Image (cartoon, helix red, strand yellow):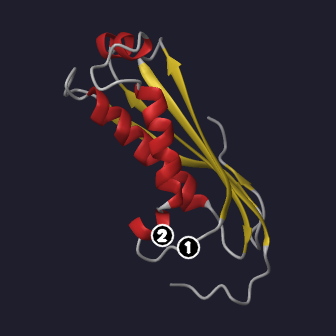
């Protein structure tokens, strides 16, 4: 684990995103809240928040971080038949929260998959990426839009 004891506490923020490609039939089941396991979007949101709080347990060399906030947003994209997932994590401390945001998105996507897998095995998770980060020595960073 990297020694961060010499670093100053600063406000840190990170945003990550990903998507779950469901296909039209499963998409309509999710949109109508007709998946047998229950409310997919709410359960996945809660799973993502819980995952962010457990990042240091899941990823061996991550620091345990006192998170100030974690927000997971789920959006339905009917044209692409997918769920768009965005997570934002923030804290004040000596190290960033990129891994917490990425973990939140990853687990939220996996939860959508788990809840929908009985309806289709063709579901795909894709595009998990860091969108932006702020704070710390390296400053702000934003992914360039294509």
- In what quadrant of the picture does the C terminus appear? top right
Q: Residue 108 in the image: x percent, y percent? A: 44, 41
Q: Residue 132 in the image: x percent, y percent? A: 67, 50
Label 2 belongs to which residue? 56
In the image, taking residue 29 as reference, residue 71 lies left or right, namely right
In terms of secondary structure, where does tag 1 sit? loop
Q: Which mark is residue 64?
A: 1
Picture residue at 47% right of the left edge, 12% below the top: 78
**Residue 35 versus residue 66 in the image, above or below:** above
Label 2, label 1: how far apart the Cα atoms are: 5 Å
Given contact means CB atoms under 8 Å apart, are the residues at marks 2 and 1 in contact? yes
Nearer to the camera, 82 or 67: 67
In terms of secondary structure, where does tag 2 sit? helix
Picture residue at 50% right of the left edge, 37% below the top: 45
Q: Which mark is residue 50?
A: none
In the image, taking residue 19 as reference, residue 132 lies left or right, namely right
């Amino acid at each position: 684990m990297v020694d961060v004891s010499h670093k100053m506490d600063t406000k840190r923020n990170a945003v990550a995103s990903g998507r779950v490609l469901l296909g039209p039939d499963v998409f309509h089941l999710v949109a109508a809240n007709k998946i047998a396991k229950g409310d997919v979007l709410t359960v996945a949101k809660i799973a993502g928040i819980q995952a962010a709080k457990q990042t240091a347990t899941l990823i061996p060399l991550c620091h345990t971080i006192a998170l100030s906030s974690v927000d997971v947003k789920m959006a339905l994209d009917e044209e692409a038949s997918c769920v768009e997932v965005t997570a934002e994590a923030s804290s004040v401390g000596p190290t960033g929260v990129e891994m917490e945001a990425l973990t939140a998105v990853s687990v939220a996507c996996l939860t959508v998959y788990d809840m929908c897998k009985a309806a289709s095995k063709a579901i795909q998770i894709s595009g998990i990426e860091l969108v932006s980060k702020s704070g710390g020595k390296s400053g702000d960073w934003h992914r360039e839009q294509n």
